[in-house]
Image (cartoon, rainbow, N blue to C red):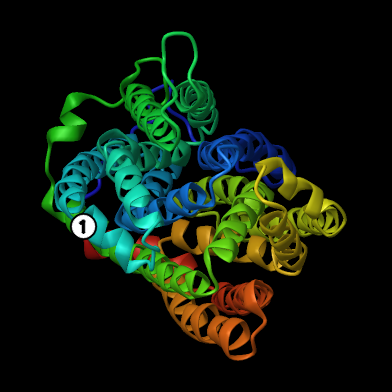
């Protein structure tokens, strides 16, 4: 299946995988990725902040339910992105750029087809979908309208996930970062103008925020595709890379994507059930939980950025037959993330109640959100471990182990323990966050066991022999 390695393309090269310069390579990749992830989450963070300043708990709850539904719909695209990134990075590490582009092109093409299907299937049933999450009679109509509008961003926003994954796999974390900065800036400016009105533009409230998100994500998707085809970039894809179909490549891609998709689907499905439990606690708890989630998302985005660097190095090191570099990368980044997450956790304990006030919600919502964030300090180091270990295993081609760990941990802790603590014991929102901390502790432990066993070192060569 694979073509002979192409080493004549002087604009295409793999990462510096020397042990002596490994730290430099990690930080060179991680810095743009960290900024990108911080800016990416700001798209949703800014939306929540703007809606919070509308002083309407129903609108805040509606945006949360619609946002969580979009996360659920993202599952197949994240699975495809994981598979594409893994294959592109491994072949890029081999200097086989032609095969790497083939996988990138097929992945992006499939993503556009899937995105159109998501929009066609979900738009007519938007009200029923929001109702399944336990929205109250006041929240349901708002959530339905918001969800239908944000769904329109799927056509370009969802393929953007796959395009950016392919770009990062080549070692270019700067281009997705620049695109995300542009996207997020556009989102904030447009959403504020449409929500509160400016000049001839009349205030649209929550609806304006939704349209701001659509415009910004569509812009981000266009920019990402332009990077793929740009002659000045390392990946330099052509139309033929998007339109050619190689059956063996497609089978390999889908088999790798399937467990990653199941992992994301399990996580997203459990998250929806999880939010259904939180909704039982009432609209105030739901609004507070929404604020706490967004603030915590900012806290662990550095770990997500670090994991992006790890995945690119891991995949290319495996392709270059340097498994010791891959293993060393994981160990070093886990040390870096531990120090970082402990510092952020300490900040949460001290300043979380003050940070929650930025959302301009009611005093009761702010108080509950602040306490939840203080509890979340317990989980931050383990959350970072889980993110890095998952990204490492998947980049090497092992997408099944993270799926098994996710399934067991989500069922036992994210659902059963949350219900036990929050409802049965009557701990409310605090019980939700204590149980979540246990989930991340268990998940990071399970992933580390699979990583230590080491079969991920042999997956790439076995796949090549099977699909030759």
* SS state under label 1: loop
- Name the spot of residue 162 as percent of width and height, x first: 35, 42
The residue nearer to you, when weighing 305 against 97, is 305
- Residue 155, quarter of picture: top left
Establish if 243 lies above or below 451. Answer: above
- Residue 210, quarter of picture: top left
Question: Does residue 16 appear in this view?
Answer: no
Residue lying at the far front in this picture: please name it.
138
Q: Residue at x 71, y 41 (%)?
A: 358
Mark 1, residues whose alpha carbon is within 10 Å: few (<14), some, or many (≥20)? few
Q: Which residue is labeled 1 in the image?
A: 468
Q: Quarter of the image containing the C terminus?
A: bottom left
Left or right: 452 in relation to 242: right
The residue nearer to you, when weighing 11 against 237, is 237
Q: Residue at x 69, y 73 (%)?
A: 430
The residue nearer to you, when weighing 7 against 279, is 279
- Name the spot of residue 448 as percent of width and height, x first: 61, 74
Q: Residue at x 13, y 34 (%)?
A: 243
Establish if 311 lies above or below 173. Answer: below
Left or right: 12 in relation to 418: left
Establish if 259 lies above or below 317. Answer: below
- Name the spot of residue 257 as percent of width and height, x first: 30, 60
Q: Residue at x 78, y 63 (%)?
A: 374
């Amino acid at each position: 299946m694979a073509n002979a390695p192409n080493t004549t393309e002087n604009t295409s090269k793999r990462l510096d995988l020397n042990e002596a310069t490994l730290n430099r390579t990690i930080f060179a990749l991680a810095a743009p990725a960290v900024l990108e992830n911080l800016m990416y989450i700001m798209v949703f963070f800014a939306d929540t902040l703007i809606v919070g300043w509308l002083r309407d708990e129903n609108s805040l709850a509606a945006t949360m339910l619609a946002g969580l539904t979009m996360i659920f719909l993202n599952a197949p695209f994240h699975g495809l992105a994981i598979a594409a990134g893994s294959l592109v990075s491994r072949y890029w590490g081999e200097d086989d750029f032609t095969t790497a582009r083939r996988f990138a092109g097929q992945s992006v093409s499939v993503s556009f087809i899937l995105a159109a299907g998501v929009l066609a299937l979900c738009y007519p049933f938007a009200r029923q979908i929001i109702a399944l999450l336990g929205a109250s009679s006041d929240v349901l109509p708002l959530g339905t309208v918001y969800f239908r509008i944000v769904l329109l961003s799927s056509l370009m926003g969802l393929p953007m996930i796959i395009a950016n994954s392919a770009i990062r796999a080549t070692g270019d974390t700067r281009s997705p970062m620049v695109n995300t900065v542009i996207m997020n800036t556009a989102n904030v400016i447009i959403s504020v103008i449409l929500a509160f009105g400016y000049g001839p533009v009349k205030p649209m409230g929550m609806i304006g925020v939704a349209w701001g998100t659509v415009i910004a994500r569509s812009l981000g998707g266009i920019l990402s595709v332009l990077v793929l085809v740009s002659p000045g970039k390392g990946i330099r894809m052509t139309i033929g890379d998007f339109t050619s179909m190689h059956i063996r490549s497609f089978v390999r891609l889908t088999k790798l994507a399937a467990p990653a998709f199941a992992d994301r689907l399990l996580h997203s499905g459990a998250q929806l059930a999880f939010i259904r439990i939180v909704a039982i606690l009432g609209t105030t708890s739901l609004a507070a939980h929404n604020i706490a989630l967004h603030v915590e998302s900012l806290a662990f985005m550095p770990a997500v950025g670090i994991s992006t660097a790890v995945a690119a190095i891991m995949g290319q090191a495996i392709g270059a037959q340097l498994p010791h570099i891959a293993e060393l990368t994981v160990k070093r980044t886990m040390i870096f993330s531990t120090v970082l997450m402990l510092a952020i956790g300490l900040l949460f304990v001290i300043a979380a109640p003050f940070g929650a006030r930025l959302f301009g919600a009611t005093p009761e919502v702010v108080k509950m959100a602040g306490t939840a964030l203080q509890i979340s300090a317990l989980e931050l180091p383990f959350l970072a471990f889980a993110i890095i270990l998952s990204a490492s295993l998947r980049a090497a081609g092992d997408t099944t182990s993270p799926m098994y760990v996710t399934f067991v941990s989500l069922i036992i802790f994210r659902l059963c323990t949350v219900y036990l603590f929050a409802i049965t014991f009557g701990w409310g929102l605090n019980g939700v966050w204590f149980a979540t901390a246990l989930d991340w502790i268990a998940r990071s432990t399970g992933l580390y066991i699979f990583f230590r066993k080491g079969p991920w070192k042999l997956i790439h060569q076995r796949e090549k022999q099977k699909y030759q």
